[in-house]
Image (cartoon, helix red, strand yellow):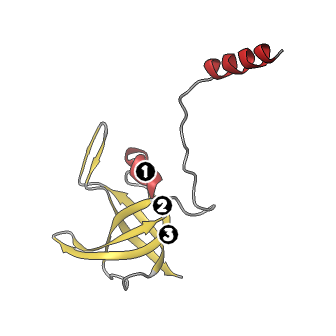
Amino acid sequence: MKNLIVLVFIWGLLSCDNSFTVEIKPVDNKHLAIRRILDSSTEYATQEVWVKGLSSDTTKTPLGSMYQLTDATGSIWVLTDNIPKENTRVYLLAKVETLFSFREGALGLHLVEIKRELQ
């Protein structure tokens, strides 16, 4: 009997599809996880999305002022007219943009801030 149970268990393991995908769903009904934008840059290119996270590193670029927005899934740069204080919780409506897109992804993926709400 034990041999039959072991055989059935092994058969079940071998017959399973070993590949799986992890789908990162919106953080809530309104906000996307940053990782989802990073992993699906072509899907979200030129779209407006809501994200939330903590503001950090800032820089000035030829495009304008930028800060990094970080949530539990990743970080992304945000182009803005008004940089929030460091370590500020930010709710953000932004447009997803890239500097250069190609089939496998994008170079210079960033968000352009449209509307910000502080928590």
**Number of disc labels:** 3
**Vertical placement of residue 38 versus 119, above or below:** above
At x 76% / y 14%, what residue is drawn? 3
Q: Is residue 8 above or below residue 77?
A: above
User: Between residues 37 and 6, which one lies in front from this camera angle?
Assistant: 6
User: How many C-alpha atoms fall within 10 Å of the one at disc 3: few (<14), some, or many (≥20)?
Assistant: many
Q: Earlier in the sequence, mark 1 or mark 2?
A: 1
Where is mark 1, residue-wise? 44
Q: Is residue 109 left or right of residue 47?
A: left
Q: Is residue 27 left or right of residue 35?
A: right
In percent of width and height, residue 89 lies at 48, 79
**Residue at 56% from the left image edge and 27% from the top image edge:** 18
Furthest toward the front, the residue is: 2
For badge 1, the amino acid type reads Tyr
Q: What number is the disc on residue 49?
A: 2
- Identify the residue shown where x is 84% and y is 14%: 1
The amino acid marked with disc number 2 is: Val
How far, Cα to Cα, is label 1 from label 2? 8 Å
Q: Position of residue 68 (x, y in %)?
A: 34, 70
In whole angstroms, how far apart are the C-alphas of marks 1 and 3? Answer: 16 Å
104 or 81: nearer the viewer? 104
Q: CA distance from mark 3 to mark 2?
A: 10 Å
Q: Point out which mark residue 52 bears.
A: 3
Helix, strand or loop for disc 1: helix
Front: mark 3 or 2:
3
For mark 2, give the secondary structure.
Answer: strand
Identify the image quadrant of residue 27. bottom right
